[in-house]
Amino acid sequence: MYSGIGSFFREGCQLFRKNFGKLFLYNLFIFLITLALILFFILASIASISYINIRVPVIYSTTENFGFFLVFIILLVLIGPVFFTSYQYLFVRLVRKEKVSFRNIFAGFKHFWSIWATHFFTQVIALGGTILFILPVLILVFPNFISKFNLPALFMNSQYWFNNYWYYLLPDSLLPYFLPLLLIMLAASFYWACKLLFTGLAALDKRLSPGDAIYYANNITRGFKLKIFLNFFLPIILMAVVLNIVIVLTENIWPLALFIPLLINLLNVFIFLPLCTSIMAAAYVRLSDQFDNYLPENLLERFTAKKNSRNNDSSGKNNEDKNN
């Protein structure tokens, strides 16, 4: 059905290289905004604690501090998925060679609840799917786990059990059961991650409802899950392994123990994040374009590319031509 599609990894790297300067500035703006928000919450929390300590017992200041932290977490949970989808959408526009500006990073907030609901249901489906994958193994393992689990040690000496958690929880006889369970869980997680990787982008790019966005993302990845894993997730895994090895090897070497983690965090913000997002955007554009070309008549109006930025731009030009 589909013709061959090139390497998402190669195209993403080319996109990142060609737009490095622009992406560096955008990420710098985002980094500064995020840093300012974090500092605001920290200073507001410190100010509130100082103000309350003069008037009320310490327990209330602790509650107030927790309240600021809770507000920050709620904002992160609400705004994070929408903001990151908007960030990805900027790269989609770059792949399509469209004009981009910093305001494109906030494009998703015009469709806030649709994107957020899409993200929420995507996580629920992925979690449920992963559980269904490992459920048969859990049913087989659970009786053996209970029979070999050291329950008397847990209830008779709970403090010692807490300090030696793995000694009591995972005796040698249980390790063979957990290894296949872990492997199946990882395989299921990556399967669903590849399957539903583009739901947020579909909701924003196509202006789709959560149900349609999930349906669309599921269809464009059909037959390409392994390619998505090899081009997107595998490089991320390899980079994470290498970086963690570097951190472990230098954690006892001064001043590398301080310098290396800081350098890696900066590389994550300015190199690895935009590079991985470039690969993801390249994959989305190629798969969605190819899928749109093969849409049947009954789905043409529902998922046609007329709803995305390319056709909005072209329709605007057509209207200008008619007016002229």
Image (cartoon, helix red, strand yellow):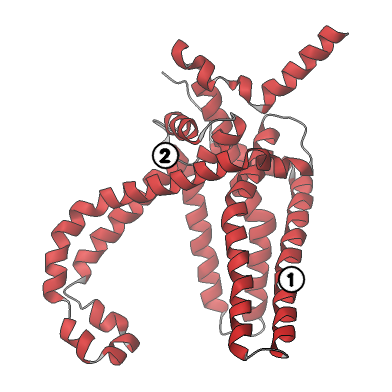
Place of residue 123 in the rendered image (x, y in percent of width and height, measured from the top left): 44, 49
Question: Horizontally, is 82 left or right of 156 in the view?
Answer: right
Q: Quadrant of the N terminus?
A: top left
* Amino acid at circle 2: Lys
Name, please, the residue furthest toward the front.
55
Q: Quadrant of residue 155?
A: bottom left
In the rendered image of this protein, does residue 251 appear above or below residue 9?
below
Label 2 residue SS: helix
CB atoms at circles 1 and 2 under 8 Å apart? no
At a point 67% along the width and 71% down the height, the residue shown is 262
Q: Which element carries disc 1, helix, strand or loop?
A: helix
- Answer yes or no: is residue 26 visible: yes
Residue 36 found in image quarter:
bottom right
Q: Residue at x 79, y 40 (%)?
A: 101
**Residue highlighted by disc 2:** 195
Residue assigned mark 1: 39
Sequence-first tag of 1 and 2 = 1
Q: Nearer the viewer, mark 1 or mark 2?
A: 1
